[in-house]
Amino acid sequence: MDPVEQLKARFPYMFMGKTVSLEFHDGWLPTFAETCEQIDKLLGENKREFRWVQVKEKFGSARFYFRLGKSKRVVIDVIDPQEKEGHALIKNATRIGDAVASRIDAIVDEAEAKTQMICMLCGADAQTRPFDGYYWTLCAAHAPPVKPINRPGEP
Ligand SMILES: [Zn+2]
């Protein structure tokens, strides 16, 4: 069975209802599966209508967006004009004063950070780097060659 189908069969409640989009990358699937397991264990008997609403890649990092009942976490992306680097800068808590919600936020934070060191294609060690203005997290084997800069006048 397809690993995504396996996860859906294991944790059906996480994949119920409307989603924005679920885009999975092979190299990050084990991290996502671990995240599902950790959250499932944490929730215990009461799943509190937890579900994934969007899974995607942004700035070379996986992004796992979820809802917990009526609450969701707001993430605001910022592009640093100096470094031309994009990253999530503001992450608002899913529900202040809710220990389970805080723990889920922490699990997701950790998983997203982990994907910035894992090749999105094969799961090998990698680093997020810019390639032609786009950020990707790719291992040495999967990284496209960086184009040499053509400097006029140089031999
Ligand atoms: Zn790779």
Image (spheres, grey):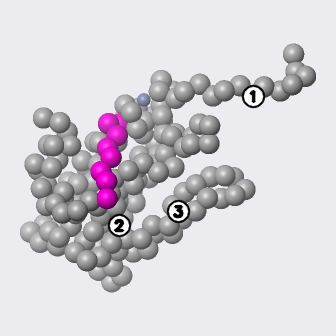
Q: Which mark is residue 149?
A: 1
Question: Residue 39, image x and y in percent?
Answer: 23, 61
Say which element carries label 3: strand
**Residue drawn at the location 9% of the way across and 69% of the way down:** 45
Residue at image location 47% in from the left, 23% down from the top = 141
Q: Is residue 140 above or below residue 69?
A: above
| Occupied quadrant, residue 146 | top right
Mark 1 or mark 2, earlier in chain: 2
Q: Is residue 25 left or right of residue 69?
A: right
Residue at numbered disc 3: 77
Pointer 2 residue: 105
* Residue sitting farthest toward the right: 153
Q: Is residue 148 above or below residue 137?
A: above
Q: Is mark 1 within 8 Å of ligand 1?
A: no
Give how far apart the Cα atoms at labels 2 and 3 are: 16 Å
Apparent side of residue 134 relative to residue 120 in the rendered image (left or right): right
The quadrant of the rendering that contains the C terminus is: top right
Observer-nearest of 30 and 50 = 50
Q: Are marks 1 and 2 in contact (CB under 8 Å)?
A: no
Q: Residues within 10 Å of mark 1 (few under 14, many from 20)?
A: few
Q: Which residues are magenta?
A: 20-27
Dot 2 surroundings within 10 Å: few (below 14), some, or many (20 or more)? many
Q: Amino acid at mark 2?
A: Asp
